[in-house]
Amino acid sequence: MRIEVTIAKTTPLPSGAVEALAKELSRRIQHAWPDSSNEVQVRLAGGNQLSVLGGAKEDKTRISEILQETWESADDWFSAE
């Protein structure tokens, strides 16, 4: 699957947050789909969006849940140092 997350450029983020989010989201998605080749890309854009290519509708729903959980738990895995 190819997963692309875009974050609105107007969202205030600390330095390194986009890269850290991509890494943590990749780790969690690989854990959920260990037998699948997954590519995760996170970038800044005009708005917030999630795109999932090569997956079922249920996969997009689960990935959306994983993204929400990852975002909400940023204090656990992100360090701005």
Image (tube, rainbow, N blue to C red):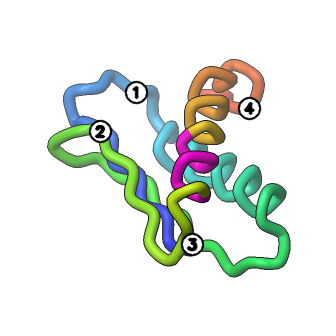
Determine whether label 4 and label 3 are within 8 Å by CB.
Answer: no
Rendered position, 66 above or below 1: above
Kindly identify the residue that appears in the image at 83 percent across and 78 percent down: 35
Name the amino acid, label 3. Answer: Glu
Kindly identify the residue that appears in the image at 59 percent across and 28 percent down: 80
In the rendered image, which residue does mark 4 sit on?
Answer: 77
Whole-number angstrom distance, CA of label 2 to CA of label 3? 18 Å
Name the amino acid, label 4. Answer: Trp
Which numbered mark, 3 or 1, is in the foreground of this view?
A: 3
Does the segment drawn in magenta span residue 51?
no
Kindly identify the residue that appears in the image at 38 percent across and 58 percent down: 51
Determine whether label 2 and label 4 are within 8 Å by CB.
Answer: no
Q: Residue furthest left?
A: 46
Whole-number angstrom distance, CA of label 3 to CA of label 1? 23 Å
How far from the left and from the top, in percent, is residue 29?
70, 57
Nearer-the-camera pick, 27 or 32? 32
